[in-house]
Amino acid sequence: MKTAHLDRLFTILMLVLGLYVTVTAYNYGLYRETVPGPGFFPAIAGVLMTVLSAAILFRDLSGRMRLSGEVALPVIGGVAGVTVAVVAFVYITPLIGMATAAALAMIAIGYLTEEPDRKKGLFLPKLAALSIAAVAFCHVLFGMIIRVPMITGPFGF
Amino acid sequence: METLSLLGNGIATAAMDPGMLFAIFVGALVGLLIGALPGLGPTAGVAIMLPVAVGFEPTVALAMLAGVYYGAMFGGAVTSILLGIPGDAPSVMTVMDGYPLAKKGQAGRALGLATYASFIGGLIGLVGLTLMANIVSRYALMFGPVEMTALMVLSLSLVTVLGTDDHLKSFLALGFGLWLGMIGLDQIMGGPRFTFGSMDLLEGIDFSLIAVGMFGLGQMFLALEEQTPDRVDAATYSYRSMLPQIGDLIATKTSLIVGSLIGFVIGVLPGAGATASTMMAYGVAKKMSKEPETFGHGALDGVAAPEAANNSASYGAMVTLFTLGIPGSATTAVLLAGLLMVGLQPGPRLFQEQSEFVWTLFGTFYIGNLALVFITILLTPILAAAIFISRGLLFATVIGIVLYGIYSIDLSMPALLIVAVFGVLGYVMAKLKYPAVPLIMGVVLGPMLELGVRRTLIASRGDLSVFYSHPISLAIFIATVIILVLPWISRLYHRTMKPSRA
């Protein structure tokens, strides 16, 4: 994906968000008698976002300033993969327990973020061993030392 | 004298508490590693450690977090000198002369000098922090809501203008941050704003989640674009060669002192940052040198000045954080999150109400700065090897700790979803050259600014003249206008001058 396209997409999103914030802020009420109401400050933020994103979009479309380069596919895959792994961890923890879910998430994250040519040989066993060790360390640190109640699953951890 | 006595007590308290010493050690160690690892800077390090540290008592937590911050400043130099690869942005200038020195077979000498320069810079920065914190906090007690409001506007303007050349994106990031900070209940009227009907959003988005997402996860995503080096011609050295060489310290004394002072002043200035201070210190050291032609080819001053500057800047940046409650950089913004999470509100009252906490914490900084000299020298081989750590193994471990840490803050699993969202946002914004500091400052200072302005206007019954009838606030507002207008005038001047010269 080209960085310039991502930039344009992000600017449009900011423009839409800015307009939404401005309109919503206006509905909250800009003034109550003579003092600023709940919508006054959000309106400033909204107008700022709208005007500036419009200016950036204009600058981009007129070709005055455009970002070069692109976001490589493996990077997009890595970012998406890690995000999905974190989301999956949130939803599967109540079912299988925090330790198992964390170990699985860590293995997935480690595999997805490693460079392709380095995934050979003992990488996977090392990753699994490290994930289990890190989970054990976290259980000692958070569960025993800081005394945070952990979410346990059918295996009791 | 009083300051000296308070500091003495603080150092003694910290030195006699094993928990505190352990926190300093852990923080410094993590900081050194973070500093040595390319792609992860001090902000990412402090953000990653934040959820872990806040589980401990306040002084231990902050000693650990600050340890990561100043530890990273020491660590960055190791890979810069031995491998020519800067571990973090503030150590970029150290490569210029550190690596050529290493290639000449003087790696140990350069490493030793960088470590002692870091110590001296840190010490000068600490003395500055100690003196200024005491003075500023006393004067700041005289500041009312109007002056504090003016100061917040000034800080927001400084971080937005100084942080980047692209002011449009910088101000857009600020606007976005201000809006994020307004999500939740209105502080005056009590009604919900931008909560989209969600009960979870009534209390707003926890600032620490934004910080961990944007600076921790976001920076890691950004590091996915970098390649782990397979084999680099690392320079060799011996522990003996890293021992202090008095001759080198005397030869570089001017650069050390000037670098430290520049670092401290730039550090105090919101938005400028440690990296800018190293560039300025390097430039000044080169100008002051009798042999400027040696710079870039292994000049000792070229190592001493930036290393002294970045360490001094890290303490300079803490002045406004502790005395006014206003962070001047991304890392101090994350430290602010740490302070708020352990139930402390930084500002002039902190020195009155939590005097023991402040001075013990400052005491840990002195101990940490000294301890880092020994830890850095001892761990140099490990730090140099850290660059070759498998990315997958590193990220899996760090994110695993973050998962546990974020859950531990409020025993909330959905908090991790917020971190994930801000992680992606942090990556996208960094990729698109949006500075993150104005955003995070908008989140932190926005609600405080809104509350200050609205309360003041309620008290004055809507009379805006309260803001400019106070001389201090008027002066601050004038300074703000100058800061905002100056880049435009400068651009206009350059545009009109260029054609006329041509």
Image (cartoon, coloured by chain):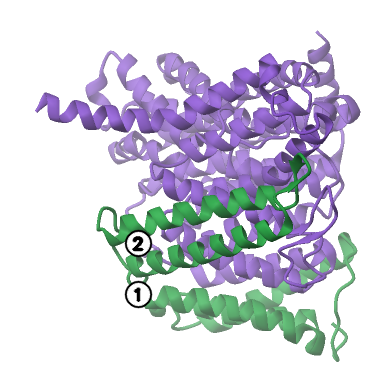
Chain colours: A green, B purple
* Viewer-proximal residue among A120 and A86: A86
Q: Position of residue B36 (x, y in %)?
A: 50, 49
Q: Position of residue A54 (x, y in %)?
A: 42, 57
Q: Indicate whether A110 appears above or below B235.
A: below
- Classify the position of the C terminus of chain B by image quarter: top left
Tell me: A125 left or right of B235.
right
Q: Residue furthest top?
A: B1
At 54% across and 39% down in the image, what residue appears? B73
Q: Secondary structure at mark 1?
A: loop
Residue A67: quarter of image: bottom left
Evaluate if marks 2 and 1 touch, with contact meaning CB atoms under 8 Å apart. no
Give me the C-alpha separation between circle 2 and circle 1.
30 Å
User: Which chain hosts label 2?
Assistant: B
Q: Residues within 10 Å of mark 1 (few under 14, many from 20)?
A: few
Tell me: B126 left or right of B199.
left
Eye-nearest disc, 2 or 1: 1
**What amino acid is labelled 1 in the image?**
Met
* Viewer-proximal residue among A85 and B72: A85
Q: Is residue A33 visible?
A: yes
Residue B180: quarter of image: bottom right
- Classify the position of the N terminus of chain B by image quarter: top right
Identify residue for label 1.
A1
Identify residue for label 2.
B231
At 58% across and 76% down in the image, what residue appears? A83
